Every structure is written in structure tokens, then in C-alpha cells.
């Protein structure tokens, strides 16, 4: 349970981190809050030769008003988000989900940039940012680029992040008063990974549903949009939810593992999509 | 090896450490502060909880080098001038100690939580302690202790 020995560098700035990534190449790994990385290093599933610690980059720890969206610094801790008033007011699903991750001690360390960079399809925040159609700001040697969440998560633990790039910011839309949200996570025990999670962002329109954006956790190699449910709900009356949710698992490819069989995950996706959309409509 | 300088229970220490040295091992074996327990080793059980700049963290999931320049408080640094912290007294009076193994982590996680939410209800306390496991008895007396301490500090 002791990690393989590694060299340790402290990044003094984002530019310095990029420089260090260039120097050490794919032998190195960025360390943010460490609550995905350190456990897998302890299990020796990962053995980077060099860790580049971003822990001093307090300038990446913020929530700012971006007009129609919120800008969240990559080193913002989950616990910061769980208690942030601007997040609660404009994009409550992010604060709610941050407060759901791990436990308070984990939330004190874990960061939004870290959990997105890790890109685990069983993680909750990737689905939430996907359902919000948020974007991820990435900085590299050639400057900054903004990547849509849909393009960021590419495969199991694989993101669009280049070898010499650092996530610096996450952008999420401000939700208007007609938009409700829900994140539903099903697991056996409180700290477990989601067997299945459902993030729903639903816009109400004249007593019926305007549009719905739904993203599923742990139903494939990346967060997956439940597109057939979204299409069925577009402009639909509220009582259409139960039937629409029956296609939530369409186009998914859940794994069978010790937590749940693929068939059970499909069942859960249908059940929790219905409940998530209903909760979003009432919120 | 890497030189670190940090404050632990109000005392400043400077040591050369291997980067892979976990904070919990630095505290127990480097500083002989064995009040901090090693439990599950997988970031789940909370036995190794300490305060980092006043906030609860799991010292098995932090390298000692990451604590460089920061303030650590372990259960052995909670008392002041020989007086127990109100949370320690509350655990004592409600028999929240039980076998004692999870107690340092329970106390520190609770101290940290009351700073965030000084007047929690029972359900909130149980949720706040979800990352701290008791494996000998149960949570009734632990929750009562936190309720008592919350009443005193609010």
C-alpha cells in the first residue's frame, strides 16, 4: 500500500506546470487534490516517475460570474463548491453533486479540475458537466483552448487533455428560473461509486417540458447522453416522462462488474432517469 | 528526498522526507504522534483524519510533501493548556469512545464539521461522519457526543 518511489516537483504557476510536463513527458502526472490519483498509486495501478503538484496554485481556486455562465477554477475543492452561494443560486446541480462526492474530508481535498481530468465514467461530476453542456478550459504550450464536455471525455479514463496540457477552468451555464435539475446516484453504501447515476437538466415551458438534457454515469466508457429520452421529452407534456424514460439505456454499453450486472445497470438507468426528470421538473 | 517545513500541533518541524511518504506515516513514525490511526489505507474509513489548516483530511491520502508550509492538527493537539477540547469532553461524557480506534478521526471530523455547520441536526451529523467508520459498536453515542458539543459551541 506504499506507492512506487517518484520524484516530486511543485508547480509555481500554470506555465511552470506546462514547462515541467514538457520536461518530464509521459513519465509525469499532475497532482491536484490527489483523491483519485493517490489511491491508485497506493494500489500500484499507477506509478508515475514524477508528480507535478498543483497544490500551490490557489489562483485556480475560484468561482466567478461570467455573465451567462459561471467560471470555476480547476483547483476549486468540492467542499468549496458545496458551500458556494453563487453556485447554489445559479447552478445548484454542481454544488449539490460536489457535496455528494466521497465524504467531507475527501471534498476538502478533491478538486473539480482533478475529477474531470481523471475522466472516470463512474465519477459523478463528469456526467453533471456533460448534462449542463459545460466546457473545460485547457492550457498548453500553445495557449488556451476551450473544449466542450461532449468532446472532452473520449474513452475510459481518457480525455482530450494533451500530454502537456493542464485544465485551468470549468464553465457551466447559469440556469434560469424555468430550468430544474436533479442528480440521482444509486449505490449500495454511502461512499461507493455510483452503480448508475443520472444528471438531468430540464427546462419547463408553459406547464409542459421545453427541453431535457440527461447524462448517465457508469453506463459506458464516458458519460453518455440519453438522447432518445431527450428527444421524446422535447416539447412533451409532463406525463410523458415515465414512458420516455423506458429508452434511457438505448445506445449505452454498461459493464458487468462486482457492483452490478449490465442488465441491472440498464434497469437502474431507466428507473432513475424517470425519477431524476420528475425531480428536475419539480425543482 | 525533499525538505519540508510544517506546523504540527503548534510546533514547527523541518525534515527531509521521501516524496512517497504518506502524511499519516510521517506523523506516526517521524513525529511519534501515534494518536492518528491507520485504518483501511484506502481513503474510506477516516481513522487517519487530521486537520489541515483547520479542515478535516485523510492523512493516508496525502503525501507529507503536500503538507509543506501548512498547519496540521492531530487529536494530540486539540487540548489547550491541559483542558480538553469541548468535543473531547463530549465524547468522554457520552461514551463516544467505545473501543477507541476510530475516535481520533471521529473527533477531528466532527470539529471540522461544526465549523462549517455549527447547529447541525442528527441527520446532518450522521451524513457529515459518513467518511468515518466505527467497526466495534455503532454510532449512537458518537452522534450524541457531537450533538452535545454543538450545543456548547453554538
Image (spheres, coloured by chain):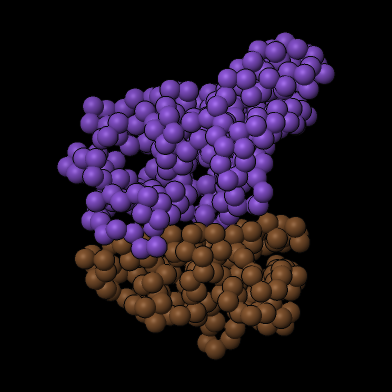
In front here: A90 or A27? Answer: A27
Which residue reaches farthest left? Answer: A23
* Residue A172 seen in this snapshot: no
Q: Is residue A150 above or below residue B10?
A: above
Instruction: Identify the residue shown where x is 34% and y is 31%.
Output: A161
Depicted B152 relative to depicted B65: above or below: below
Chain A image colour: purple
Residue A97: percent from left, percent from top:
60, 41
Percent across and percent down for residue A120 are: 47, 38
Residue appearing at x 37%, y 45% in the figure: A59
The brown-coloured chain is labelled B
Residue B143 drawn at (x, y percent):
72, 68
In the rendered image, the quadrant that contains the N terminus of chain A is bottom left
Task: Classify B88 as above or below A283.
Answer: below
**Residue B75 appears left or right of B67:** right
Is B51 in front, or is A215?
A215
Q: Is residue B17 visible?
A: yes
Left/right of residue B124 with respect to residue A80 in the rendered view = right
Give x and y (percent) for residue A240: 79, 17
The extreme bottom residue here reads B82
Residue at 24% over, 67% down: B3
Amino acid at each position: 500500500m506504499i506507492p512506487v518511489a517518484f520524484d516530486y516537483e511543485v508547480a509555481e504557476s500554470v506555465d511552470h506546470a506546462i514547462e515541467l510536463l514538457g520536461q518530464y513527458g509521459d513519465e509525469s502526472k499532475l497532482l491536484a487534490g490527489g483523491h483519485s490519483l493517490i489511491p491508485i498509486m497506493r494500489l500500484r495501478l499507477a506509478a508515475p516517475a514524477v508528480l507535478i503538484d498543483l497544490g500551490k496554485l490557489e489562483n485556480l481556486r475560484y468561482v466567478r460570474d461570467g455573465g451567462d455562465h459561471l467560471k470555476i477554477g480547476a483547483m476549486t475543492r468540492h467542499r468549496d463548491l458545496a458551500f458556494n452561494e453563487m453556485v447554489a443560486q445559479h447552478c445548484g446541480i454542481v454544488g449539490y453533486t460536489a457535496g455528494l462526492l466521497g465524504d467531507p474530508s475527501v471534498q476538502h481535498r478533491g478538486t473539480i479540475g482533478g475529477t474531470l481530468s481523471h475522466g472516470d465514467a463512474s465519477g459523478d461530476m463528469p456526467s453533471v458537466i456533460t448534462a449542463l453542456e459545460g466546457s473545460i478550459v485547457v492550457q498548453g504550450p500553445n495557449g488556451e483552448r476551450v473544449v466542450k464536455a461532449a468532446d472532452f471525455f473520449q474513452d475510459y479514463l481518457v480525455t482530450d487533455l494533451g500530454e502537456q496540457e493542464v485544465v485551468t477552468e470549468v464553465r457551466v451555464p447559469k440556469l434560469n428560473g424555468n430550468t430544474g435539475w436533479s442528480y440521482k446516484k444509486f449505490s449500495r453504501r454511502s461512499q461507493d461509486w455510483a452503480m448508475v447515476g443520472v444528471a438531468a437538466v430540464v427546462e419547463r415551458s408553459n406547464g409542459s417540458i421545453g427541453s431535457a438534457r440527461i447524462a448517465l454515469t457508469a453506463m459506458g466508457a464516458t458519460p453518455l447522453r440519453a438522447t432518445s429520452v431527450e428527444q421524446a421529452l422535447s416539447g412533451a407534456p409532463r406525463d410523458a416522462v415515465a414512458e420516455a424514460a423506458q429508452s434511457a439505456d438505448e445506445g449505452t454499453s454498461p459493464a458487468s462488474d462486482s457492483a452490478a450486472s449490465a442488465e441491472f445497470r440498464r434497469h437502474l438507468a431507466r428507473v432513475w432517469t424517470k425519477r431524476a426528470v420528475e425531480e428536475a421538473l419539480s425543482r | 528526498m525533499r525538505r519540508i517545513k510544517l506546523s504540527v500541533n503548534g510546533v514547527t518541524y523541518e525534515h527531509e522526507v521521501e516524496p512517497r511518504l504518506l502524511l499519516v506515516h510521517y506523523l506516526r513514525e517521524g513525529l511519534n504522534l501515534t494518536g492518528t490511526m491507520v485504518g483501511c489505507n484506502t481513503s474510506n474509513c477516516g481513522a487517519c483524519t487530521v486537520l489541515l489548516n483547520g479542515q478535516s483530511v485523510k492523512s493516508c491520502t496525502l503525501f507529507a510533501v503536500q503538507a509543506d508550509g501548512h498547519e496540521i492538527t492531530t487529536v494530540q493537539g486539540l487540548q489547550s493548556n491541559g483542558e480538553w477540547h469541548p468535543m473531547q469532553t463530549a465524547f468522554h461524557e457520552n461514551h463516544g469512545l467505545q473501543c477507541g480506534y476510530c475516535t481520533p478521526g471521529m473527533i477531528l471530523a466532527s470539529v471540522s464539521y461544526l465549523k462549517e455547520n455549527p447547529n447541525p441536526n442528527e441527520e446532518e451529523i450522521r451524513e457529515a461522519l459518513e467518511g468515518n467508520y466505527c467497526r466495534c459498536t455503532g454510532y449512537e453515542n458518537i452522534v450524541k457526543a457531537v450533538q452535545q458539543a454543538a450545543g456548547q459551541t453554538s
